[in-house]
Structure formats: C-alpha cells, structure tokens
Amino acid sequence: MAGGPQGSGVDTAAVIFSRACGYGGLHIYGKREYHSNIKGLHSYFHIRVSSREVLANSSSVDLLAAFDSETVVRHFHEVSPRGGLIVDERETQKNIFEIPTLPKEFKDDLKIKIEKLKLGETISDLLKYIEGRGGKVFIVPYMGLLRGIADKLGIDNLLRVMPTLNVLSIGISFSILRYDKGLVERAVRTTFSDRPRIAEMNLLALREAFDYAEKAFPEGLGTSLRVLRPSEERILIQGHQAIALGKIFGGCRVQTYYPITPAGDESWFLEAHEVFKIKGGEGSMLVLQAEDELAAINMANGAALAGARAATSTSGPGFSLMVEGLGWAGNSEVPVVITYYQRGGPSTGLPTRHGQDDLRFSVHAGHGEFARIVLASGDIRECFYDAAMAFNYAERYQVPVIHLVDKALADSYKTYEIFEAEGYRIQRGKILDEVKPGEEYKRFKIGDNAISPRVFLGTLGGVHWYTGDEHNEFGHITEHPRMRDSMVEKRMRKLELIDREIPLEEKINFYGERGAENIVVSWGSPKGAILEALKALNREGHSLGFLQVRMIHPLPWKEIREILRDRDKVIDVEMNYSGQLGGIIREKTGIPMSFFILKYNGRPMTSTEVQEALIEILKGRAPERRVLTYGS
C-alpha cells in the first residue's frame, strides 16, 4: 500500500509498482481510494501481488509506503505481523492528534484505539507497535536523498526534484523485496515515456533509492518477490478502461457524457483514443461532452436513431437527471446504452467512494412502465464483454440497456491474459435499408413479435415520427384507449422475449458445488472477494456455492428459484443497506434470504472480511444481518 496527500504521486507510484510486478509475470489486483476534495487530503492505493491469480484485496498490508504521517496513523494497524513500514525520518516524532487533515470523527475513534492498545501519541509510538508485533520499520532520510539527486542533476531548487519522492518510495520498496531493478526501470520508462527528461530524473531517483536501501537495510523485509516467466501475454487494465475498450470492440461510435466521478475516467480515456486501429485500417469514435446529463442522454438517443451505436456514461446524480431521457427512449424504443457507475448516495453522497445502492433505482427509474435491460458486471473481464454485448441487446430488442458497474470496478487494476475477440458478433436486429416507393412504413408496427423493423433517420421512404407522448404505429400522438393498450403491451412483451432468448449463461454464473447446502447470492464487484472466500472455505470442507446474478432485469427468476429452493442457508452479500438484490429475489421467487452480509461505508469488500463473516454463519454464531466495516 502506498499512501499520502492527494496529488503527491500516489497513483503514479501505484502504476509503476503494478507495471514492474506485471513485467515480472506476477498477478496483480489493486484498488484506489481518494477523497473528493481534488487535492491535499489522504489517498492510498492498495495493491495485492501473487504468483497466482488474485481477485480482490485482503484486509492486511505486508508493506506500507507512507508519504506522510497521516498514512501511518490511518493504516498502522493494518500492517501484518512480519510486515513492514517505510516512513520518512521527519515524520517520526509528530504528535498524531496534531495532524491537521485528520477529521474529528477519526481522531475520536483513534483515541479509543490507542488507549486500548496502550500506545503513546506520537508516530514513533505507532512504529514501536508494528515492531512489537514482529514487523519491520524502515526509516528513510528522504530529504537527504532528494538533495543528492538535486546535486547530481545540478539543480539548486529542491522543489524541482520533490516530485520524485514517489519513485524513491518505489525504489526502497523493491529493494527491500529483493526485486529485479531492471524491471522497475522499465516500468518507470513506460510511465514517463512521453517525457524523456522527467523519465531520466526518476530513473536516477530509483537507482539512488535502490542503492541506499541495499546498504541501510541489508536484511530487507525477509520476504521477496520472485520473478516469473509466464507463457501467455498479459495486460494490466483498469475497469473503466475495459469498459471503454469493450465499447469500441462492440461497435460504439458515439459516446456522450457530462463529467462526473467516477464515470468521467471512461469518457476521457475514449477521448484519448477517438481514432484507433482495427483490422484492415483505422476506426473512429465521436466523444461529446454535453452541457449537462439531460443533454447527454438526448444526444445519445438522437445518435442511436440516426443509426450509430450510441452510449452515454454517468454516475448516480447524473443518472437522476437522465431519467426523463431514459423514459423517452423507452417510449420511443430507442437502442441506447447507459453505463452507470454507482457511488455512495443519496444526493452527492460519497462522490469518490464505492457503493451498490442504485440497483432498484436502475430497475425502476422513470415514470410509467417500459422495457429495459439492467446488466451488472462482476469483474473487469465481464466489464469488457458486457460493454460490447449491451449494444447487441439494445439493438436486437430496441430497448435502453443500463450497464450497471461501480466505483470499485471502475478504479481497480488487474492483470489478465489478453481478452479474446473470437465469438462476438455484432447483431443489429431488425433494420430496413430502404422503404420502397408506395409502401407504408409503420415504425411501431404491432404484430406477433414485439420488435418492429426500424429505419435510420434519413432512410429513403422511411417517414415516421418520434414523440414523448403515446403514439400509434406511425408515431403520431394518440390517446385512443385501444391503441394505448396495444402499445403498452407491445413494449412490455419485450421482457418476455428477452427472458426467453438470451442464454442463461449470459444472465447468471454459478460457482462451487451445484448441490451445496449453503448458497451465497450476490451481484457486481463483491464477486472477487466472495470467490476467494469460497475457495478457502471449500478447502476446509464447508459446503458452499455462489450464485452471481448478472442480468438484474428482466430477472431470470424461474432459474434462480430452482437454484435456491430447499437450501439450508441462502446468504445475500451486497454493498448497500437493505440487501436490494435479496429483496428483488424474494419478490419474484418467494424465497427469503437467510442471512445478509452488507457493507455501505464506501469501501469495497475484502476477501478477508467476507470469509470471516461466512465462517460465523456456517458455525451458527452470526446474526441474521452483519455489517462489514473495514476501510480507512
């Protein structure tokens, strides 16, 4: 874990660390946590590294690189026994209650904690606590190292080399882990590839840190990172990047947005890659920043009607503003995709923190009733493929598709083998290229099938109308009772068609024993933590399975009912207060959840806390509802 003031280079340090480990063939899973104040308050990056695939973070830290005293205070208790802490020598004598950026609530909790542990009130006292548990503390004279770098570069102003502090911490970290310095140098060059002079300065900082740590800490941490040589080629990718690439792969050619956290990263990534290479040449995408979210959804609606595969991207407050346009799309049978990045609500809530509070909102948003698909990804690989499949669903069934993800997925890093492109085919549904002279075109034709052939705006002979009002088969406004009944039923029959035609394997995943006595039910980003917990518990002889629901609406309730009926325990794991998926399943199937494992403090679930909560349930010691609280 690397932590420090926002804007101090924590993210860059994490990227370099992750890349260096990836170059060595190691598996990586990393999450980013940051405040919403732009700059100054505490942020940190928690990276898990292993020779085997990792799917989530754990609740402990083996090596903590602290850029400031606040990082020590917030995370000292997470340093594992025999773990280590890297700290600036200038920070060690500071009084922990005089750190100005610590909020009152945190100080109140901290006072109780240090009294319980019988600790003093300085950073040095916390360092002694780590050492007393068997950990190691590496006190580093960062200012002295910075002065040495400045002297070698002939720079008088120390402020000009201060940005290399993050790379100094990287160098110290990898040195005490006895890792290949050449791989770290490669990661530094890649990270600063567009700024050669900055790259050279940081390479010097890296070497200075390596050399210093080898002499000052000859025993290192006592554990090392072993370089592997995998046979397959791998990528290191963030969730929002996977979604953006999935959109390109799925044929999206218009993306609209209004900047909002955490959704904005996806659109900015697309803006940086509006022209891209494809087989046989180049492709391109138009990315439009709108004046607000209402304009963004309406632009995407218009682009979809004109024939482009179109999407917009937003988070909770922005989606609230888009609901009018969503209803218009439902009424007009527009194949538009909305990528919905959840964060903590309500209102502005937790702008840069995690949440799964918006499941019911995404299913029910909008007045009146109309068909939609709500698709929820559980990991970064699914983010890529679901982002592409959303366009097929939208165009085949002429409905808005809400691709529901969250901040945890958006900001996490993970290593993967390169995603396969085989097996995916663009399916545009019923489209007429032309309407012959004299033929009558009914855009909303009522027939045995709920899907009417559509034409793109401007198609010769394809005259029709779009309106927010109820309409007849041509699109003209009507309030006739029979036509109203017919149109409502036509639109809602799409849900039956979707439920019947989309394969079950695209709607749910099941892991573990099919005949398990106990079934965990969840959706979205808790997937990785659940899978790791189940793997450990199954090894211990516990009977557990995991049902991941990917298509929330229309819910495959008959299949879910068959899986959940007659089980000993059904355990709902979600990151919201009320167990929203569990409630929806009970509404549709009549099967109640036996236990709830919930979290809503804005931080993602870890495999450690999920495993501990499941053990308590399996041993008969748990309450019906358990709330997880890990996170700083």
Image: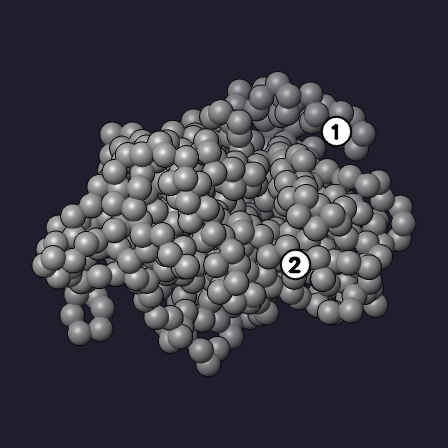
Crowding at label 2, few (<14), some or many (≥20) Cα neighbours within 10 Å?
Answer: few
Residue 277 in view, yes or no: yes
x and y percentages locating residue 142 in the rendered image: 45, 41
The residue sitting at the bottom extreme is 231
Tell me which residue sits at (68%, 43%) in the image: 587
User: Which mark's residue is nearer the viewer, 2 or 1?
Assistant: 2
Q: Name the residue under label 1.
A: 114
In this orientation, which residue lies closer to the viewer: 364 or 38? 364
Tell me which residue sits at (45%, 53%) in the image: 494
Q: Mark 2 points at which residue?
A: 558
Tell me which residue sits at (70%, 51%) in the image: 589
Crowding at label 1, few (<14), some or many (≥20) Cα neighbours within 10 Å?
Answer: some
In this orientation, which residue lies closer to the viewer: 573 or 120? 573
Apparent side of residue 229 relative to residue 131 in the rendered image (left or right): left
Write down the quadrant of residue 65 in the picture. top right
Please, which colouring scheme is shown?
Answer: one colour
Write down the quadrant of residue 244 in the picture. bottom left
